[in-house]
Image (cartoon, rainbow, N blue to C red):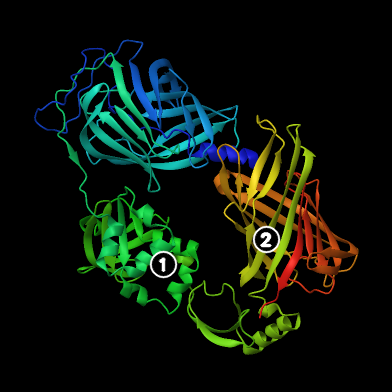
């Protein structure tokens, strides 16, 4: 599915803003409904503690309760009133539908985009049987566009919801869709845990509550406090962390009519405090390599989450058993490293007494580890468990004496190869271990093959000695056009872009140099979003390289074709959205051996921003249209003028131009002009060039 960048920005504003489903209180056996009798006492009872489920209460009045909350967001305080508006059957479940009315429509800034958002409606469809929220809807207005998120829960177990007990833990799959439909529906796993029984004071009084925490992939979403004293349809208090750029807190003001107080109420209790499993690993001293790997793979925060987790933790000695170079190779390949680390983690807290009764366990990585008992020894795959039951606040560690490797990421055996890279002029021999040692290198099984390839590359120019080459462009952006909103836009600015070749890297089998840029000055552009899918046309202000760090480019050493481009920018819409746009290009098969006027070739490009549900694929047709004498600040050069026209993209009716030196003096164009993407044109002219030493 293809959608426009502007629509993708709106999606970014909404993905974390929509309302996660609540696991509301309820009894799984009898139809529940809000009672209609006595008002509450506002202090917790002092009767004997028990975790016995509260009794089922009598049927409510047909209208159901009226529930009022005081809702705080930054300096804004609004009042939300929920009433039973209708009855519906959703996914085969009979539900009450509670709808909110506001004394004033709440205003929010979405996370992470900062998009200004007005909340125009909230409703919950609650199971009559279990009082779980089966479906939640949020109606919002983003820049004049009415949007609705619809989330439906698919619970994983039958014992979810009330009657809660301290320590309860379960999951649901949250299915999300948006109206109008701007992307395919998606599913998010939600972990739910009752972490405490505690007293909570809100405007309606003080209530003994079950504290229920919601997380997804280790990240906190909501915390809710459900009354342990009364069978209420909605929680006493809610704190929302993830949806907006500040906390949203809902506190109960009134609940009418109130249900009867339960006769048995649990005593306060909470999860044990103390170090989590990551803290333990760091403090222990035997897991320094494991900790370094977790940091490199950005998994520390995940394993510091609520969990619980069971970690089969290899010691430093276990990592030392791997072939030489394997650890370094994995640290250089984060996806493979992440895959291996998650293969050591099992969801849930599985103590040693339970492990010995298993034959396998599914890991967070997705594959199963085998578990076997031989005499008094326990093995996970081929690793022996040497220490068990090191408990942390969010799980347990079992220490193993070898690193676990999932099948598809197992590194090959060590092999002796000949190699060279951009820093060498002779072939060298080295023993390579692991599947990830080849990035940036050319490797060969025989010395003869290595020497032949090195001679060919050396003979084609100074390609093996380009690291350190640098150049500077004077860049002018000039826009004097009528925008898509019908107003005249006049924008002009000059910036200086300095680029340095920092290394060599193989991308999709193509030997590339890596060029990193810095930008001096504010590179302001205008992006013409033409409208569609219910969105009005808009001229979006954009700042390229907002922090001064410009694009990183991978360019083929053979064809000079750009293979990959990573570009930071900031869209100054909806509070400002920082993006890092990656565009990948194919290396053309029909690229001519030597340029001449009339030569043509074709290549493809793709931008895929998964976070913002944006994908754009284009075909580019290039042609050498002339040989021209080009004057730039560095001097005058005879150049091939290459016209490149794109098809398949949103603004593909425009042509870009590149001027390459006829003498092949430079790794970069002498001049180029971008007319694609933004209104107006962006022209780069070479002002300095320093070859590598």
From the viewer's side, name the closer residue of 192 and 585.
Answer: 585
Asked if one can make out residue 436 in the rendered structure from this viewpoint, the answer is yes
What numbered label is drawn on residue 180? none
Count of numbered tags: 2
Residue 283 pos. (x, y %): 26, 64
Residue 459 at x, y percent in the picture: 75, 83
The crowding category of the residue bearing disc 2, from other C-alpha atoms within 10 Å (few below 14, some 14 to 19, many at least 20), is many
Q: Is residue 577 above or below residue 304?
A: above
Q: Residue at x 75, y 80 (%)?
A: 461
Q: Would residue 688 be found to the left or right of residue 608 on screen?
A: right
Q: Which mark is residue 405?
A: 1
Disc 2 element? strand
Vertical position of residue 416 compared to residue 520: above or below: below
Quadrant of the rendering where the N terminus is positioned? top right
> Which mark is first along the chain, 2 or 1?
1
Q: Which residue is mark 2?
A: 497
Q: Position of residue 349 (x, y in %)?
A: 27, 52
- Looking at the image, residue 670 sits to the left or right of residue 165; the answer is right
Do the numbered discs 1 and 2 sit on residues whose CB atoms are within 8 Å? no
Alpha carbon distance from label 1 to label 2: 45 Å
Label 1: which secondary element: loop
The front one of 236 and 94 is 236
Image vertical order of residue 357 relative to residue 472, above or below: above
Q: Give residue 427's quadrant in the image.
A: bottom right
The image quarter containing residue 628 is bottom right
Mark 1 packing: few (<14 Cα in 10 Å), some, or many (20+)?
Answer: some
- Residue at left 33%, top 58%? 360
Residue 410 in sight: no
State the image coordinates of residue 455 (x, y, percent, origin top left): 71, 86
Residue depth check, mark 1 versus mark 2: number of the one nearer the observer: 2
Location of the C terminus by quadrant is bottom right
């Amino acid at each position: 599915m293809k959608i426009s960048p502007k629509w993708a920005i709106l999606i970014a504003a909404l993905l974390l803003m929509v309302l996660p489903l609540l696991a509301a209180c309820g009894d799984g056996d009898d139809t529940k409904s809000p009672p209609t009798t006595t008002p509450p006492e506002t202090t917790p009872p002092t009767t004997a503690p028990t975790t016995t489920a509260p009794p089922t209460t009598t049927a409510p009045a047909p209208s159901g309760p009226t529930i009022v909350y005081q809702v705080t967001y930054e300096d804004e305080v609004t009042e939300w009133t929920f009433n039973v508006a209708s009855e519906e059957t959703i996914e085969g479940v009979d539900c009450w539908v509670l709808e909110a009315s506001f004394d004033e429509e709440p205003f929010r800034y979405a996370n992470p985009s900062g998009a200004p958002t007005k909340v125009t409606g909230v409703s919950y469809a609650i199971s009559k049987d279990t009082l779980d929220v089966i479906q939640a809807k949020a109606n919002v207005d983003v820049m004049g566009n009415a949007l609705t998120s619809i989330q439906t829960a698919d619970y994983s177990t039958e014992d979810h919801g009330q009657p809660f007990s301290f320590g309860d833990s379960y999951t649901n799959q949250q299915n999300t869709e948006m109206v109008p439909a701007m992307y395919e529906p998606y599913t998010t796993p939600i972990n739910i845990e009752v972490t405490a029984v505690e007293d909570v004071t809100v405007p309606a009084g003080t209530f003994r509550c079950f504290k229920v925490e919601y997380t997804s992939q280790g990240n906190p979403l909501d915390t809710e406090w459900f009354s342990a004293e009364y069978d209420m349809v909605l929680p006493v208090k809610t704190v929302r962390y993830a949806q907006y750029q500040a906390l949203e807190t809902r506190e109960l003001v009134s609940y009418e009519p109130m249900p009867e107080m339960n006769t048995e109420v649990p005593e306060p209790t909470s999860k044990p405090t103390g170090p989590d499993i990551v803290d333990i690993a760091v403090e222990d001293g035997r897991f320094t390599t494991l900790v370094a790997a977790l940091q490199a793979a950005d998994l520390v925060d995940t394993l510091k989450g609520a969990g619980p987790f069971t970690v089969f933790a290899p010691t430093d000695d276990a990592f030392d058993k791997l072939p030489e170079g394997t650890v370094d190779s994995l640290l250089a390949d984060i996806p493979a490293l992440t895959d291996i680390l998650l293969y050591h983690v099992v969801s849930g807290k599985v103590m040693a007494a339970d492990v010995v009764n298993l034959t396998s366990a599914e890991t967070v990585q997705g594959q199963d580890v085998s578990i076997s008992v031989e005499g008094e020894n326990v093995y996970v795959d081929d690793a022996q468990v040497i220490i068990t039951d090191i408990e942390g606040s969010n799980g347990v560690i079992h220490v193993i004496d070898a690193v676990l490797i999932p099948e598809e990421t197992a590194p090959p055996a060590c092999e002796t190869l000949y190699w060279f890279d951009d820093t060498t002029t002779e072939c060298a021999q080295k023993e390579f271990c692991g599947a990830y040692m080849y990035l940036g290198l050319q490797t060969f099984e025989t010395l003869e093959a290595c020497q032949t390839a090195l001679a060919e590359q050396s003979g084609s120019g100074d390609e093996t000695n380009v690291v350190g080459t640098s150049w500077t462009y004077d860049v002018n952006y000039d826009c004097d056009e009528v925008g898509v909103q019908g107003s005249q836009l006049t924008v002009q600015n000059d910036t200086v872009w300095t680029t340095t070749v920092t290394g060599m890297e193989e991308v999709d089998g193509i030997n590339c140099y890596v060029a990193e840029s810095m930008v001096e000055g504010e590179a302001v552009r205008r992006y013409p979003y033409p409208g569609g899918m219910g969105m009005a046309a808009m001229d979006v202000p954009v700042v390229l390289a907002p922090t001064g760090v410009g694009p990183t480019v991978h360019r083929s050493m053979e064809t000079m074709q750009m293979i990959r481009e990573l570009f930071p920018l900031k869209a100054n819409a909806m509070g400002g959205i920082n993006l890092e746009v990656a565009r990948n290009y194919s290396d053309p098969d029909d690229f001519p051996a030597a340029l001449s006027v009339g030569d043509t070739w074709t290549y493809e490009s793709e931008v895929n921003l998964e976070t913002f549900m944006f994908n754009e694929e284009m075909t580019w047709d290039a042609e050498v249209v002339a040989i021209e004498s080009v004057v730039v600040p560095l001097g005058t050069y005879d150049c091939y003028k290459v016209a490149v026209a794109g098809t398949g993209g949103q603004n593909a009716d425009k042509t870009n131009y590149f001027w390459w030196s006829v003498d092949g003096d430079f790794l970069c164009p002498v001049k180029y002009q971008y007319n694609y993407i933004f209104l107006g044109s962006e022209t780069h002219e070479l002002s300095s060039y320093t070859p590598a030493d």
